[in-house]
Image (tube, helix red, strand yellow):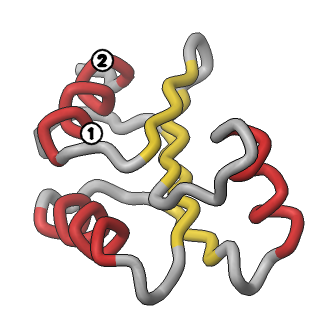
Amino acid sequence: MNDLVYPEILMYSRSFCSDCVRSKAFLDNNKIPYTEINILEDIKAQEKVISINNGRATVPTIIINNSEKEIILSEPTDSKLAEAISKLSLK
């Protein structure tokens, strides 16, 4: 995946979330840049996550976006995350 131009990736997380740790490790291990926002430290981010997830503060909520399309994932597996990133990456 490292020869691609990656889309913008925004990860909403909590520090004690094991799924968040796993998703961050996947991104870090593959050298994929992302921005992380801890929803416990940012009330507006928490409200956005709740809005996206039908009233639940589900994390990680990951928004992957390029200039043409946006994909939102909630608690994705590593394979779902890789698939979404690949769909929006440029070669």
The residue under label 1 is which amino acid type? Leu
Tell me where residue 42 sits by quadrant: bottom right
Q: What residue does disc 2 label?
A: 87
Q: Residue at x 68, y 73 (%)?
A: 39
Residue 26 position, x and y percent, is 17, 61
Estimate the x, y position of residue 2 in percent, counting from the top left.
Answer: 13, 45
Is label 1 in a helix, a strand or a loop?
Answer: helix
What residue is rendered at 62% in x and 77% in y? 38
Image quadrant for the C terminus? top left
* Dot 2 amino acid type: Lys
Q: Secondary structure at mark 2?
A: helix
Label 1, label 2: how many angstroms apart (C-alpha)?
A: 10 Å
Q: How many callouts does the rendering have?
A: 2
Which mark, by number, is residue 41? none
Disc 1 marks which residue? 81
> Residue at coordinates 16% horizontally, 47% vertically from top-left?
78
Specify which label sits upstream in the sequence, 1 or 2: 1
Q: Indicate the position of residue 10 as horizontal and vertical percent values.
A: 55, 53
> How busy is the neighbourhood of tag 1: few (under 14 within 10 Å), some, or many (20 plus)?
many
Depth-wise, is mark 1 or mark 2 nearer the camera?
1
In the displayed structure, 50 sits above or below 57; it is above
Q: Residues at badges 1 and 2 in contact (C-beta under 8 Å)?
A: no
